[in-house]
């Protein structure tokens, strides 16, 4: 199965933070074809291992998050409508008229829509107002709260954007959870490449949980693996649309990215600065393989690497990824060539990484 088919399958799998089992099963099945061993840990991380050929190999962890953002049911109203809170960074201006799936306590999924006041009855002062998530509701067609409870939906149940996948022009695709099913698809391609050309280092290929919730799932995986280095694969923000053209240089179709700086700056004061030896390795591999390499840095972003770097005595980390448009919306867009380039680049880096490589910053 090619990259296009893999990302399609992954994007159509509903897997909000805390409920990643469907996605973990898909990833595990793919990794088992190429890894020496694959397991799912207690938290739900999917961890595959490809043994290195060195006698005392470095441990490399390559990871992408399996979860997607969504909603949590806060209240089932007597009239059968459902109120929710955000599970991750949902853009509230995208909510009215949205199609969603809700997960019952028995694991079943049910369609619904986020209601929007009829345009004909909306006064002028409301037409340009963004309603907070706490003021909108989901309509599943139920007539009472007992109808909702009958299909096992109660407070605490999760919901997601209705999963979609669309092929656009050329090698571009659109839909839900490009962030970070594109990274997960990249993991499967990396596993296939490394199975064919064994690295000297031990490579742990990990699909992580909880990234959109609190970015702590990868931490637990790193605690068990005890890696020397870690490569985080996630989206970067494309600057090739008219609204972001003056903020970012990254463009779709112009290759994978390395993120040199990230800092959340709101609430969670954490971030990551690229490990220079790993950045040099990425530049060297990109040059040797004729892979264009884009550079990205931004304030207001955070990835799992921010916490993985703090494990043990410190993990050398590099945030890498691929450009995406319209992130955290139901219509994210990416270019498959960028994901394929990221797979080639990461694989080339790992194949050339021997047990004597110095990862220290100084």
Image (cartoon, rainbow, N blue to C red):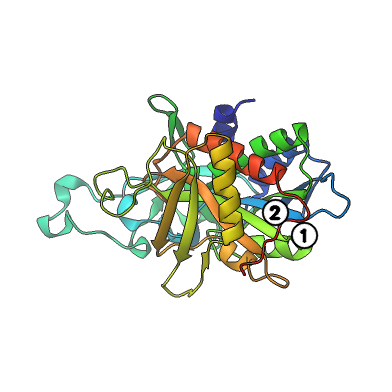
Q: Which residue is mark 2?
A: 61
Judge by depth and name the residue closer to the eye, 146 or 40. 40
Kindly give the residue lying farthest to the left in the view shown.
Answer: 124
301 left or right of 127? right
Looking at the image, is 331 positioned above or below residue 327?
above
Q: Secondary structure at mark 1?
A: helix
Q: Residue 172's quadrant in the figure? A: top left
Q: Residues within 10 Å of mark 1 (few under 14, many from 20)?
A: some
Residue 152 at x, y percent in the picture: 59, 52
Alpha carbons under labels 1 and 2: distance apart: 8 Å
Q: Quadrant of the N terminus?
A: top right
Asked if disc 1 and disc 2 are in contact, CB closer than 8 Å, the reply is: yes
Position of the C terminus, as image quadrant, is bottom right
**Is any part of residue 217 visible from this angle?**
no
The quarter of the picture where residue 186 lies is top right
- Indicate which disc, 1 or 2, sits on the residue closer to the N terminus: 2
How many numbered marks are there?
A: 2
Work out whether residue 9 or residue 321 is closer to the camera in this orientation and state it.
321
Q: Residue at x 73, y 39 (%)?
A: 31
Residue 285: x %, y % from top left? 59, 42
Residue 140, x across and y down, in percent: 44, 46
**In the image, 285: left or right of 169?**
right
Find numbered disc 2 in the image and state the secondary structure of the residue it sits on. Answer: strand
What residue sits 42% from the left and 72% below the top?
A: 265
Q: Is residue 47 left or right of residue 293?
A: right
Pick the front one: 343 or 101: 343
* Residue 57 appears in the picture as rendered: yes
For image coordinates 44% across by 32% down, the residue present is 173
Name the mark on residue 225. Answer: 1
Residue 150 coordinates in the image, percent (x, y) = 57, 51
Find residue 267 and report its image quarter. Answer: bottom left
Q: Can you say whether 299 is above or below 175 in the image?
A: below
């Amino acid at each position: 199965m090619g990259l296009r088919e893999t990302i399609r399958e992954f994007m159509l799998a509903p897997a909000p933070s805390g409920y990643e089992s469907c996605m973990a099963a898909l990833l595990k099945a793919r990794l088992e074809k190429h890894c020496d061993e694959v397991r799912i840990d207690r938290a739900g991380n999917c961890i595959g291992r490809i043994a290195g050929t060195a006698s005392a190999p470095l441990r490399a962890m390559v990871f992408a998050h399996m979860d997607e953002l969504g909603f949590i049911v806060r209240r089932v109203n007597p009239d059968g409508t459902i109120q929710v809170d955000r599970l991750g960074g949902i853009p509230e201006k995208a909510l009215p008229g949205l199609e969603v799936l809700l997960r019952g306590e028995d694991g079943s999924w049910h369609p619904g829509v986020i209601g929007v006041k009829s345009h004909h009855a909306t006064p002028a002062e409301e037409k340009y107002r963004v309603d907070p998530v706490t003021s909108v509701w989901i309509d599943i067609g139920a007539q009472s709260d007992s109808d909702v409870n009958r299909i096992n939906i109660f407070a605490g149940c999760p919901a997601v954007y209705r999963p979609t996948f669309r092929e656009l022009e050329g090698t571009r695709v659109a839909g839900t959870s490009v962030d970070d099913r594109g990274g997960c698809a990249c993991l499967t391609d990396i596993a296939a490449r490394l199975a064919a050309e064994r690295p000297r280092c031990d490579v742990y290929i990990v699909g992580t949980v909880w990234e959109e919730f609190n970015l702590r799932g990868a931490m637990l995986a790193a605690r068990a693996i005890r890696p020397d280095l870690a490569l985080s694969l996630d989206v970067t923000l494309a600057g090739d649309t008219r609204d972001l053209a003056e903020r970012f240089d990254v463009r779709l179709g112009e290759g994978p990215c390395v993120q040199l700086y990230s800092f959340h700056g709101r609430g969670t004061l954490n971030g990551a600065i690229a490990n220079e030896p790993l950045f040099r390795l990425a530049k060297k591999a990109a040059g040797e393989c004729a892979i264009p390499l884009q550079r990205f840095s931004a304030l207001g972003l955070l990835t799992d690497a921010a916490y993985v770097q703090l494990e043990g005595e410190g993990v050398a980390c590099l945030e890498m990824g691929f450009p995406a448009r319209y992130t955290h919306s139901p219509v994210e867009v990416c270019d498959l060539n960028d994901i394929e380039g990221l797979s080639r680049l990461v694989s080339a880096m790992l194949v050339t990484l021997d047990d004597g490589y110095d990862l220290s910053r100084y």
